[in-house]
Image: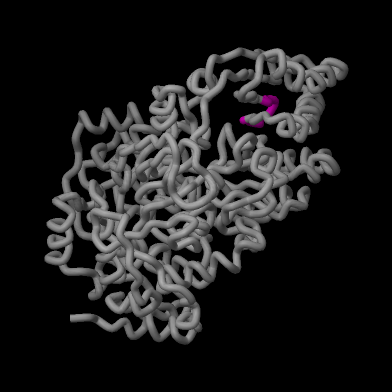
Amino acid sequence: MVHLPSVGLAVAAASGLLQTVTAAPQVSTDSTSTASTTSFLGGLFDFLDVANLTVTHHDGKLYGCKCSPGQLCWPQQWKWNQLNTTVGGNLKLHIPPAASCYNTFTGPLGTVNTYDAAACADVHANWEDEMWTVEKPGAALWTYFTNETCRPTLNPTDTCTLGYYGVYVISATTRNHIKAGIDFARRNNIRLVIRNTGHDFIGRSTGAGSLIINTHSFQDVQWISSYAGPGSYSGPAVTIAAGVQGRSILEQGHAQVPPKVIVTGECPTVGVAGGFIQGGGHGPWTTLKGLSADNVLAFEAITASGHFVTANQAQNSDLFWALKGGGPSAFAVILSVTMKTFNDVSSAGATFYVNNTHIGFDNDAYWNATSIFHKWSNHFVDNGLYVYYELFPFTLRAQPFVAIGKTVAELDAIVAPMLAELTAKGIPYDWTPKSFPTFFDLYVDLFEAEAAGGSALTGGWLFDHNDVATNNDGIIEAFKTVFSPRPDLFSFIVGHLFNPGHGAPVSNSATHPSWRNATDFVITVLPVPLGASKAVKADLQNVLTNTIDQALRDASGSGATYVNEADPYQPNWQSHFWGSEYPRLKQIRKKWDPLGVFYSIATPGTEDWEVIQDTRLCKKL
């Protein structure tokens, strides 16, 4: 029997969504083939099985909310058992990875005994290991948005609760498992979280009361010598399944003859085909070849209505465009992406340091060095370089400088003006260049693993060519504010020098237009003390938004920041993440997910959604 969603459809109709369906999507006719497609009615009429939102009053406002554990609307156990059968026994109660260090874990569905000495020792040994965390079905690499209610402990009598993690997780091994999870969430009004690797700074891979679908087991890779799909491109390509990570695809590409590369992130644990590309995706090849999203040729995906679709220039072209940088977990679940590949080439790399072994604790010398380094950033990217750097008190650390396709002599010549200026100012430094037979060899040698398990708030901003050329001093003053936003606080900076517009001056993706004149994207990191109260967290969020990142915004005219590595609570996030592309993205969201089956914070069409009472995802009515 079809359950008519009176609240959902009534709200949608009142919002004018019935007028937004302008073209029928094309969908696969069976779950095992994407070659055959057919039209269907689409739009709201394809969501007649969606469950009602739960009407709730909060702070004098009316909301329609996703169902939470303990409410009458929460699916009875037989429904969960039925879902488990459908997904081949891959549905599990989600228990945080550190629960093995506690005598018991208390979740929204009850209490279970969890202590396991050997497993607890493994937790303590690997808590900061990214790959260890990635392999957990629902864990977050950085834990602030889990609410920190089950961290490793040496006292088993401490309390371990679920916090803001999801309640159940499907470790999907087939595309039909993903479809079953989407269908179940839609038909039962359950919050849905799509999780690949958990490499997520801003809480999009976790959510209280949710069903998690884990896509990490999808590891297929198919190398294509000559792409034959729609569009003008006919060169080499690769189809990458949802769970494949950056280091893995580079390793597999290195084994090709000749060796191949793609535009992937600098961090080895990033999943290429998921939220990374849906946020745009930047990395060491971005200056030469554009953002990762600029290099996409096709997607296979599952929509909010549970349909398998192909999205490329000819089929579902609006969805194709939106998935290329339009926001993670907003339009569809990506099963695979097909991307351009490039021949790997010999490259040069270098490390560059100015720290207290050079300058002691001379504050003026440190900021002079930082200013000189940053003043030359336009010059670096205009010469095809990528630079990953970190700023800590009395430490400027760039590892690495990346010069793809260049020799050490060419890299030295590019950097020589900066080094000469430092020398003229009497500022010592370490500069260590090195040549490599391929970029992959450089990547393995010079890029470092990141640490998981930390608790912090993350912001960030883009400085473009004009910002650096006309206001470098203002940028450095903003950096000083980041370091010391208040006498009792400290934060730090991770910077990335690249310009997608150098190699791809015309965008073919949904990314912010300002990326085509980019120079430096900086991430700001504000540590949060463990055990912080709600009041302390609110205070720190205010500092991040209105002091730290406001200083960066005031020093810049770019108007832009990166979808996946910035403050989701900043004002005008729509404009800052997507600029003039946002209205089109919002309309496409209304077409493909008109009732909010998918949700991740600060993505197109989520303006009316918010988390109330700490755990309930609700829409203002």
Q: Nearer the viewer, residue 321 or 215?
A: 321
Which residue lies at the image location 31% right of the left edge and 55% below the top edge? 34
Residue 534 shows up from this direction: no
Q: Main secondary structure of the magenta part?
A: strand
Residue 504: image x %, image y %? 64, 43
**Total of numbered circles in the picture?**
0
Way the structure is coloured: one colour
* Residue 386 on the magenta segment: no
Q: Quadrant of the N terminus?
A: bottom left
Q: Nearer the viewer, residue 186 or 110?
A: 186
Residue 554: image x %, image y %? 77, 52
Residue 568: image x %, image y %? 55, 56
**Residue 38 sits above or below residue 9 on the image:** above
Residue 320 shows up from this direction: yes
The magenta region covers: 388-396
Report whether 306 appears left or right of 130.
left
